[in-house]
Each structure stands twice: as C-alpha cells, then as structure tokens.
Image (cartoon, helix red, strand yellow):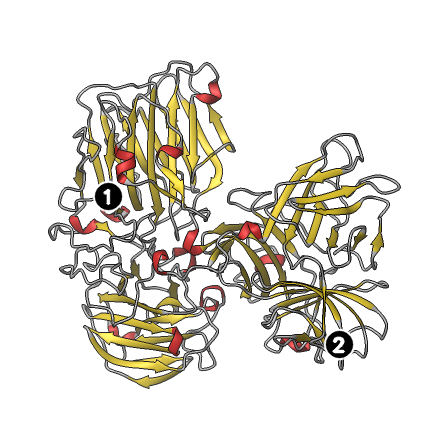
Amino acid sequence: MSTPLGSSQFFFNPALETGQSLRFDDDDSPYLTWTPASAGNRKTWTWSGWVKRGNLSSYQHIFNAGNPSPSYDALRFSNTDELEFFNGASTSSYFKTNAKYRDVGAWYHIVVAQDTTQATSTDRIKIYVNGEQVTSFSSSTYPAQNSDFFINSNVLHKLANISVSGYSYPYDGYLANVCFIDGTALDPTSFGEYKTGTTLWKPKSDTAIQSLTFGTNGFFLNFSDSADIGADTSGNGNDWTPTNLASTDVVLDGPYTGGNFCVVSPLTKSSGGALQEGNLLIPFGGTYPSTVMGSMGVSSGKWYWEIRFTGGAYTNGHAAGIATPEMANRNIDPYATTNPYNHYYDSRGYFYNSGTNTSASTFAPNDILGFALDIDNDQISYYKNGTLVGSAQSIETGQTWMPFHKNSSFTSLVQRANFGQDSSFNGTVTPQGNTDDNGLGDFYYAPPSGFLSLNTANMPEPSITAPDEYFDTLTWSKTGADNSNITLTGLSFQPDLIWAKGRSNAMSHQIADAVRGTGKSLSSDSTNGDSTNDADGYVSSFNSDGFTASAGSVDNFYFNYLNGYTYVAWNWLAGGTAVSNTDGSITSQVSANPTAGFSIVSWTQGTAGTDTVGHGLGVKPAMVIHKRRSSSSSWSVWHKDMDANPDNYYMTLDSTASKAGSTGWESPTTTTLTPYIGSSGETWITYCFAEVEGFSAIGSYTGNGSTDGPMVFTGMRPAWVMIKSSSVSTTQWMIWDNKRDTYNLSTNALRPNTSAVETTGFDIDILSNGFKVRDTGTETSLNQSSGTYIYIAFSEAALKYANAR
C-alpha cells in the first residue's frame, strides 16, 4: 500500500493542458467514500468520469451507492470486461454492454445519464463512452417511469469499490475528472470535446466544468491536490474520504493534451502474476523466460524512463531495456544469440545487445536504473542511481522500440516502472519532481538534456492527423428499388480505390480503381481478368464524397440487390488521375499518394525479371499486390515480412495457400518494382503500400496457440486490419474494420479469397495502440503456435490522438 509523502510535487508546462489522475491498485482495496447529508434528485442525475484500466477480467466497481443490505446501484466492469450499470431497488434495471473494454493503453470517458421522468423508457438511462452513446447491449432492462435509485440518496456512496458491507470488488487503474450532477441528465459534451483537427475525445477545462450547475449533491473530483485527494472542487464542498490511498497515488497520467503516459502492458505479458499499481509494478516469478513490454513504442527522438528493483535473488537474472514489437508477438528467447530484437541491462552484470553480452556492473534491490534511448543516434544509454554505466551503440535502424522487462529465473522479483508519472515509485521512495525538456513528467533523477518522457504529448505530430481523409469504410443496406443504381456518400475524399463486398450473401469482392477507370472490376476471390460493366453491377462514377454503383445488364447484385442485403466498401485515396511514370524501364501509369504511402500502378509487361516499373511512392513499398488484367491469373502478393528473404516468395490473394516460390520475385526499391511474373504484352494493375507512422502498419507476428493471443503494436488505433498466415497452409485471408464492428470484440471477418458471407469466430480486439488476437487457439487462420502471420492495417487515429477502444 502507498504511504503519504506530502503534497503535490509536480511542475507543469503552462503551454500544455495538464491534469492529474488518481491511481487505484486492487491489491490494496483502495476507495473513496461520501454520504450525502440528505437525498438529492434520485430520478435525474449524471455521472461522468475518465477511466484508464489496469488489471482486467474481474468484477471492478467504479461508482456505486447502497444500503447496508445487498441492495445497491452500481457502475462496474464485469469479470469478462463488459460495462454494467444496474439498480438493485425493487424497480430494478440492468444494462450490460456487448462491448468489451480491455484497452489499457489509453483513456475511456464514461457517462451515465439518468432521467426516469421520461415517458419513453429508452430515454431514462443513457450510457456514453468516448462521447458516443452505447446502443448495443447483451441485456437492457429500463426502469419504470419516475423510479428512484439509491444513487443520490442519503446512503453510502463509493468510488472504486462496492458500498455494501461484506463485499469487495475493487477497481484497478486510474480515474480522472469524476463529476456528479444532481438534478440534470447531461450528455458527454458537457464534460468533453474533440481536440481540434483530431479524433481525440478529451476533457473540457476545469473552468468549463466548474461552470456547470451541479445541484446540491453534485461534486467534481479533479484530484488537483495530492494532500487532499477527495476534495470537491465544484464549490459544493461535497468532499470524499480516501481509504488506502496516499498523496503518491495522485499521478501525472491523464486524458489531457499534457499526456497519456506509457505503462507496462498486461496484454504483452508472457507469464507470471498480474501487474499491479496501475500497471507499473511487475511481479515476476514462475515460467522462464517471463517478459512484458510497455504500452508505447517510438521510432525517432530521445526518450527517458526509470525502473526500480526490489525483492528476489538478483544473481539469477533480472533485466530491463528496449525491444522491438516482435518481442511482444513472437515466441523469442531474449537470450538467443541470433535475436536481433532487444538491448537490455541484466542484473548479473551484462549488457545484452541483440543476443551478444558484454560485461557491466551488477545491480541490486533498491537500485534505480535510468534508460536513455536516443533513436536518432542509434544508441541506448544505461544509468544506475543517476550515474552513466554504459551504452549500446548502433542499435538497429528503422525499428520501433518499446520498453522491455524480463525475468529469467523462478525467484520472486519485482520491477517498478516510472515513465514519468510517479518518481515515488508508488510511495517507496521520496519523490524528486524532475521533469523532461518539455517540462513534463516526474522523475527521480533528472533526464539527460534533450530527452523526453514517454507520453502522448511528447510524441511527434503525425503526418496524417485525420486518417479518414485518406482511408475510410462505408457500410449500407439495400436502398430503394431492387437492383437500382445507388450512390454512396459519407467519405471526406474522392476514392481512387474501392474494394466492396456483400456481407450477408455470398457474392464476389468487387475492386475498382480510378486508374483502370469506371466500369472496370476485378474480384479478389477470382482469377478472372478485368470485367467491363459487369452484368451484376459495377462502379460507374468516382464522386467527391463516395461513388455510384450502377446495375448491369442483369441486376445490381454486387451493390444493391434485395431487402436484407448488407454491404461494405473500403476506400483509399491515391493521387487522382494517373500520370506517366518513367522511373522504370517500362513507362507506367501511376496514381500516387506518397503522404499516405499508397499508389496504383498500371503497366504492360515487357520481359519478366528484367524490366522495372515505377511506383511513384519515393520510398520502398512494404506490401505489393499484382493482378493481370488482360487474362486469367491469380493475384500475386509480396510482403516484406512473409519470409527472412521476402524477394524469394509470393502469396496469392485468391487462395488459402501459404507462401510459395524459390526465386527472386519483387525486389522493390524506392522508385521501382521488378516483377518476375507474366509474359510480354500482358497488362497488369498493381497496388503498392508503404508504412506511414500513425496511418499504416505493415508487419508480422508469430502465433502462440493460446486464447491469450499475440498483442501486435501498430502505433495507432486501427480502422482496418487484414491478416494471412505465410507459413500455415489452407488459412484464410481475413479483414476486420471499425464500421462493421464498432466495438470489441471485432468478430465479423470477411475473407478476400472467397465469396462467402461475413463470418464470426475469428476474433481480435482493436486497441488504441494496435490489435490483440483473441482467437481460441484452434483457428489456424489467426493463431497457430509458431505460425507466421503477415498483416496490413490502416488507422482510425494515431496513438498520440487515440482514445481507448
């Protein structure tokens, strides 16, 4: 349990909107309590709070009120991570979301608005997450009109635990800006707003919130004074009493522009006990090797964080440092001499650099290590108790690096991390209040000059702050008369590539692009060449905010058939009208968008393996998809991670086959491709994709055959994900998006290699920083043990501007 160490030690950059949060460790059973002097409006009220989760998959009460008997009202997470709200009075109501809330890398905003005076039952309880109303429930029982709840009555109210004697369901994680409005049902816009030009839903200023009409029993807990944790800053004086909480539990982690800080991610943990203290304490022990990663990764800049070690026998090996995301999603022994994925400091007196060790000083319990990662100069430096003790030069370039923690013994070892939110290491030492070069963070030792804390405020501005202006998904149901033409709108751009699929009925995928022009269609599940004005429907116009699909000579089966038919279209912005590109030996017609890392290339084959084709991106593509237009052929896919020597292999989009081939095939450069396919005179279409930080991620992961599947860090909250195994045969290509599944689990997958309907049972969680495979372990298309899986993903929001999902 934390111990009091005085008042707030934090120093803020006044140019940033900053704030604090209160950390709850469920092992301490911490909570706050308050009993209203008298009942307020028990029919109409609003609760609002910002939540960053710690431990998952247990009953955790966020806010409740009740009588001494087991009758109470509660807002809580279930043991399967749904959000529940219920009333235990005689006129009971109960709500349980279909959505699962298990993103630990960012913040949720939760609002419950009650007004039982409403005549329409569905208006009496409204639940909002991140500014949007929740409408999908596995259970929803609305209260009777004019029902009174326990909340806002003259009974015990609790934050972060249950109010009923004999019960304990402590919350684990962080809470910020907790508000209660007595007498008014408000929507989220009273408490939050979008950061201008981004998708980030963030708190309004304290001043704006304090201007609200709170009513008699209303309160506002912004945790601004660590010496008075439960102080009500609404002006009402409805202060709360903390239990098992200390001043050091007020930390610099919050849903503000001043910073959502990195934590240790339980979604990456390979073994051992549950993380503690707001995902900053790692209780190692048990299976060897036990590894866990941070929740944030960086690919440029200078970054600093600290680790304090306690407990155990350090001669057996205890380490921390950096690793690439592959360590989180591959079954890699961190000691392997061929391992290129990590650099770390080991307690036995070694620096490990890509599997090779050099001698170093040992460290012991109560030592504090500092890690100064200088990606721009390819170096990580190690500090022990404020003194530089060594560094690793020439770390691998072109990589994303994440904090990495490891235990290689069976003894009980503890690491406490501080990424800039708490220099007291949860009250175990006296906080020092050192900030980074931007005036952010709270470190025990002063970071080296130029180094920053790992939080979203310090992350570089992404080149694309509005991803939906470059990629977006449209969904629709059959509209108007059967088989009529249909115009789809809702995009923020004129699409250059449209990939459409019927969801509810078996029909081929339809792929149209502005380079081939209107009326031309290809199917990812077919080897056929170009179809012109297909008899079952085709794209007839690329519009400023969508497209028009016209009926063919028979019907409009592919886009607008019968009642009950549902559809989806994925849309990309290239460069508009194609231009001639002479970078290769063959002149190609190219529509390129280097900003988004996407180009469409049309070309006519010369000599396979000799001629080159310009692609217009200016950087080396990470994934390329070819299709012969002039006659039948399979779709050919090259991906940078399908093999250690990817130029020797290809995959086919229209089949379930794994990688094939044994000779050079693609050889992309920053300007050209060298196709080893086709015969002279054949015409082709090629889609080229390069990675753009915060907008697109192209990589691979290794399956573990477990229900706790790999966590794949992408540095963004994906809007679209496609996965295929390159090593396991007869596996499906799979696509998920954020419009068909607006919450986790993302379970409705479409398969590019087949015309089959949308299917379930292929599950992932889409998260603020990537995606997590949630397959049962029996589905080889996602998670066979030791299988290699390639993916490509496009963004809804860069991590800098992402809320938890």
Residue 189 sits in quarter: top left
Where residue 73 appears, as percent x and y from the top left, is 33, 27
Which residue in the rendered view is the most extreme toward the right? 553
Residue at 24%, 68% in the rendered image? 312
Q: How far separated are the C-alphas under marks 2 and 1?
A: 63 Å
Coordinates of residue 200 in the picture (x, y in percent) = 42, 47
Q: Nearer the viewer, residue 199 or 118?
A: 199
Q: The residue tagged with tag 1: helix, strand or loop?
A: loop
Disc ID at residue 676: 2
Can residue 727 be seen from the camera position used here? Answer: no
Give percent across and percent down for residue 301. Answer: 38, 69
> In this view of the protein, which residue sits in the foreground, 282 or 388?
388
The numbered mark, 2 or 1, whose residue comes first in the sequence reads 1
Residue type at mark 1 is Ser
Query: For residue 35, what is the image quadrant?
Result: top left
Q: Quadrant of residue 450?
A: bottom left
Residue that mark 1 sits on:
29
Report x, y in % for residue 719: 55, 51
Question: Mark 2 falls on what kind of element?
Answer: loop
